[in-house]
Amino acid sequence: VHTRRSCGSSPNGEKPRPSMLRHLTSKIKATGPISVAEYMREVLTNPVTGYYVRNNMLGPDGDFITSPEISQIFGELLGVWILSEWMGGGRPKQLQLVELGPGKGSLASDVLRVFSQLRSVLGEASVSLHLVEVSPVLSRLQAQNLTGNYSQEAGAEDEPIYRRGETTTGLPVSWYRCLDDVPAGFSIFLAHEFFDALPIHKFQRTEKGWREVMVDIDPETPDRLRFVVTPSPTLASSTLVQADERRDHVEVCAEGGVIIQQLARRISEDGGAALIADYGHDGTKTDTFRGFKGHQLHDVLVSPGSADLTADVDFSYLRRMAAGGVVCLGPVTQRTFLKNMGIDTRLQVLLRNCADPSTRKQLISSYDMLTNPAKMGERFHFFSLLPHSRLSKPKKPEGLKMEKKSPAPLPVAGFSELSFS
């Protein structure tokens, strides 16, 4: 068992974890350079030495802190968004909340707190929580945070639900390895800092056309890796770059594209919505692939398996992959989204009800962290998928002289300014 501290470092801090590096170099020796996507997939999710599979990397001791860890206000406002979209979808009798890559479970737990506070709004609707998580370590942590000791692992390896439990308020929780295993039905999907960890392909424009950037062994120092550009096109470089691409360097997350297509299909068939929050851009950035270790930037090719790898989400690519099956809203900045959701009002209420100076200070600093343009406020973006029916005006009944205008659809919270009356 590795503790957080001994994460592949000797006293001088830079000795590579032999197993992952050895695994990668023998793979490259056998089959030649590997794509950046394959490198990321191995480093992050390899069942034996993968970074996500082995570590608990969230929070102050891990390699990064996420918004849900910073402030409960964040999760509460997302809970309000989910309820608002459930209402916009006609208040169906069943509501599945599906979270992709739920971290420690803090976001889900804040959202569920809103649900129990607003139980009267939900009425008779039954709510269930569905978590899509590849890391066994994290699934145990989520179970602890969400269900206490009320969860057990499935008996068989191949069961789609590999763990089940119940929250303290009696809501059923199920864990899945992939989105495909989650049952059909009206669902609100949440993906907070999920897409940025999916493997990307990298492409470079050359005189001879687009070429893929690969990871190879450095011939000078055989225990080091380096980037190389393929001499001829690869399947990925021939199929994943848009014909009208203007940039000279592009990162494409094909796996993210597939997940967006799955979400779009489910939302158009069963109703619901998806809310994606991540750092990203709308098709303007080029090289964003980077590593984090102990909250510091870390060379992506050094000591693989000891640092988190991530790339900014290209929302223009996600929109293109949704391909008109759903309505896409955003990206809007986290600052805009949270302000539209009423974060200022919520902060005032919490401050009015709080006398303790250190808690007040913490509330104000987490508000600043979430909304300050120089911090998370403009680095993070929100993007949503909705069924076309959600934004279309209801049809007027035939043959009646309707003097009154037909009701407009509810505005979509977060993406438009709501007036709180």
Image: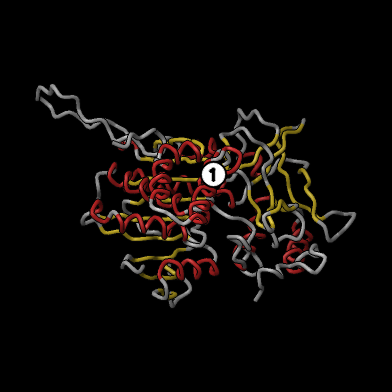
Left or right position of 139 against 53:
left
| Residue 373 picture quarter | top right
Q: Position of residue 266 (x, y in %)?
A: 37, 48
Residue at horizontal 66 percent and vertical 53 percent from the top = 309
Visible in this render: residue 205? Answer: yes
Q: Where is residue 182 in the image (x, y as percent from the top left)?
A: 40, 59
Which residue is under mark 1?
368
Q: Position of residue 327 (x, y in %)?
A: 40, 36
Q: Quadrant of the N terminus?
A: bottom right
In the picture as drawn, the residue positioned furthest to the left comes out as 400
Does residue 348 lie above or below 151 as drawn?
above
Left or right position of 113 against 29:
left
Q: How many marks?
A: 1
- The colour scheme used here is secondary structure
Q: Which of 363 and 204 is in front in this view?
A: 363
| Residue 306 picture quarter | bottom right
Does residue 282 lie above or below 62 as drawn?
above
Residue at horizontal 42 percent and vertical 66 percent from the top = 146
Residue at horizontal 56 percent and vertical 46 percent from the top = 369
Visible in this render: residue 257? Answer: no
Q: Give the amino acid type for the residue marked by disc 1 in the picture.
A: Asp
Q: Nearer the viewer, residue 251 or 214?
A: 251
Q: In which quarter of the image is the C terminus?
A: top left
Q: What is the secondary structure assignment of the residue under circle 1?
A: helix
Q: Position of residue 359 (x, y in %)?
A: 49, 56
Left or right position of 29 against 84:
right
Q: Nearer the viewer, residue 182 or 370?
A: 370
Label 1 environment density (alpha carbons within 10 Å; few <14, some 14–19, many ≥20): some
Left or right position of 75 against 206:
left
